[in-house]
Amino acid sequence: MYHYSFWRPIAGPLLEENNGGSSNATVVPLRQKMFAFDGVRVSAAGKALLQFDLSTEHFAVANEEGHQVVMEGSYEVFFKGAKGSDELLHVPVTVTGSARTVNEFGH
């Protein structure tokens, strides 16, 4: 079974209601972004442990110049199982400080 790891904004400038209609928006509103996936086979009653590493750079999104920028805000990391199963686990994450460029476009 595959497990997918995502993050999504729950407060801050990446939410659609905060910048969706603004001509000053520097990033496109975001619903969710996958940062990792892994799979394992288990028997019907079996268990398995999967580990996913999440760094600050995983929260980067492209701004209007194409630079990958991490923006402050409240986020939620969540995990889904395969074949449309329900979300399995939710973890809140807060990013503080000013926006930080982690990768410049064209460099």
Image: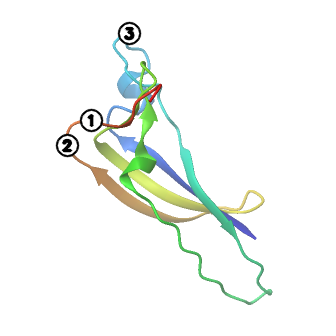
Which residue in the protein does label 1 denote?
Answer: 99
The first of marks 3 and 2 along the sequence is 3
Of 15 and 4, nearer the camera is 4
Badge 3 amino acid: Ser
Quarter of the image containing the C terminus? top left
- Determine the secondary structure under disc 2: loop
Amino acid under disc 1:
Ala
**Distance in Å between CA atoms under marks 1 and 3:** 19 Å
Q: What element carries label 1?
A: loop
Whether residue 10 is visible: yes
Residue at 37% from the left image edge and 18% from the top image edge: 25
Residue at (48% x, 51% y) in the render? 7
For disc 3, the marked residue is 23
CB atoms of marks 1 and 3 within 8 Å: no
CB contact under 8 Å: marks 2 and 1:
no
Residue 32, percent from left and from top: 53, 43
For the residues labelled 2 and 1, the Cα–Cα distance comes to 7 Å
From this viewpoint, which residue is outermost toward the bottom? 45
Residue at x 32%, y 38% (from the top left corner): 71
